[in-house]
Image: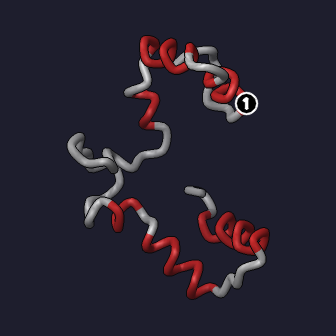
């Protein structure tokens, strides 16, 4: 999504059979941007009190330490799901 948001959104809209005009895509991407959701704060500007903490791809790794990773993997099939989605390439956080 970060490298080609318009292309990915266009694919989703096509899959759903929805219209995919460029104006609609631009409006959706702007409405869902970090800057919009974080009320004007730019990506990389951290606010730990906000639901939208930092807006940087992969930053979750800084907070998903080994203890949290173990707790997450201990829940049902969560560890396998992490691996299946490519989030657990090295077997840990």
Residue at 57% x, 84% y is 24
Left or right: 6 in relation to 55: right
* Image coordinates for residue 67, horizontal then vertical, percent: 42, 12
* Image coordinates for residue 70, horizontal then vertical, percent: 51, 12
Picture layout, residue 78 above or below residue 29: above
Q: Nearer the viewer, residue 50 or 56?
A: 50
Left or right: 12 in relation to 67: right
Picture layout, residue 82 above or below residue 35: above
Q: Quadrant of the N terminus?
A: bottom right
Picture layout, residue 75 above or below residue 25: above
Residue at 62% x, 15% y is 91
Colour mapping: secondary structure
Q: Quadrant of residue 39?
A: bottom left
* Image coordinates for residue 40, horizontal then vertical, percent: 26, 66
Q: Quadrant of residue 81?
A: top right
Numbered disc 1: secondary structure: helix
Badge 1 density bin: few <14, some 14–19, many ≥20, Cα 10 Å? few
Residue at 51% x, 71% y is 29
* Residue that badge 1 annotates: 84
């Amino acid at each position: 999504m970060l490298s080609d948001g318009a292309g990915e959104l266009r694919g989703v809209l096509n899959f759903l059979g929805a219209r995919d005009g460029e104006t609609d895509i631009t409006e959706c991407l702007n409405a869902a941007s970090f800057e919009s959701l974080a009320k004007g704060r730019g990506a990389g500007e951290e606010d730990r009190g906000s639901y939208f903490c930092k807006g940087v791809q992969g930053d979750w790794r800084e907070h998903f330490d080994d203890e949290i990773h173990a707790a997450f993997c201990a829940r049902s099939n969560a560890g396998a799901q992490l691996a299946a989605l490519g989030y657990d390439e090295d077997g840990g956080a």
